[in-house]
Image (tube, helix red, strand yellow):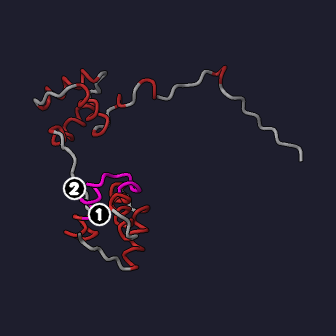
């Protein structure tokens, strides 16, 4: 079994980062490391940090291999869409010819790029990447309030 020793400065840093690091996964890793600095067993750490015992071991392996800097690193970049390379031209097209539906946008994207995508990925691309006027659904658009329902504005002041 490996022995981890933590200086008081490292413990203070772990105590801070387990709540204040911007990414929640890094916070969880720092929590595991902080609990290890408190000399708890791996089973107790797993229970208190709400992770599996294997995750505790994996985080400790990462720390042993590359220190706390390696624990702070996030190991994924996310997936990239083939449409990302066509974003400027698609955005210009959508601004000039706003689609009335996702199906119409799907057909326009296929005409412009030759890439065929399903309706859900097209909606996601339009909502995240483009300034699509129809990105907000009809239900979420602000609607005018009829005059009969508008709140009355009174300008009276309280006597004092």
Q: Which residue is mark 2?
A: 75
Asked if residue 154 lies left or right of residue 134, the reply is right
**Callout 1: 10 Å neighbours few (<14), some, many (20+)?**
some
Q: Nearer the viewer, residue 129 or 3?
A: 3
Q: CA distance from mark 1 to mark 2?
A: 9 Å
**Position of residue 107 in the picture relative to residue 142 (left or right):** left
Q: Nearer the viewer, residue 36 or 121?
A: 36
Q: Is residue 29 magenta?
A: no
Q: Where residue 127 sits: x, y (%)?
A: 32, 35
- Give residue 31's quadrant in the image: bottom left
Answer left or right for 128 relative to 88. right
At numbered mark 1, what does the secondary structure look like: helix, strand or loop?
helix
Q: Main secondary structure of the magenta part?
A: helix
- The magenta span reads 46-60
**Looking at the rendering, which quadrant does residue 23 occupy?**
bottom left
Q: Nearer the viewer, residue 37 or 76?
A: 37
Is label 1 in contact with label 2 (beta carbons under 8 Å)? Answer: no
Q: Tell me, for residue 101, which label it has, or none.
A: none
Task: Give the residue number, with chain letter if any, for mark 1.
Answer: 72
Looking at the picture, how far across and down is residue 42, in whole percent? Answer: 32, 61
Q: Is residue 61 above or below residue 127?
A: below
Q: Residue at x 14, y 30 (%)?
A: 112
Residue shown at the point (29%, 63%) measured from the top left: 72
Q: Residue at x 25, y 57 (%)?
A: 74
The correct choice, above or below, for 66 with respect to 118 in the image is: below
């Amino acid at each position: 079994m490996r022995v981890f020793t933590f200086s008081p400065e490292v413990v203070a840093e772990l105590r801070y980062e387990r709540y204040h690091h911007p990414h929640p996964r890094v916070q969880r890793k720092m929590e595991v490391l902080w609990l290890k600095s408190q000399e708890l067993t791996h089973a107790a750490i797993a229970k208190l940090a709400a992770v599996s015992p294997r995750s505790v071991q994996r985080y400790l392996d990462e720390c042993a291999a590359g220190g706390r800097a390696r624990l702070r690193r996030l190991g994924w970049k996310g997936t990239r869409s083939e449409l990302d390379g066509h974003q400027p031209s698609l955005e210009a097209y959508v601004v000039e010819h706003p689609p009335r539906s996702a199906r119409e946008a799907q057909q326009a994207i296929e005409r412009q790029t030759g890439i065929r995508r399903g309706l859900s990925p097209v909606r996601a691309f339009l909502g995240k990447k483009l300034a699509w006027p129809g990105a907000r659904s009809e239900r979420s658009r602000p609607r005018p309030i009829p005059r009969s329902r508008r709140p009355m504005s009174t300008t009276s002041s309280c006597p004092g």
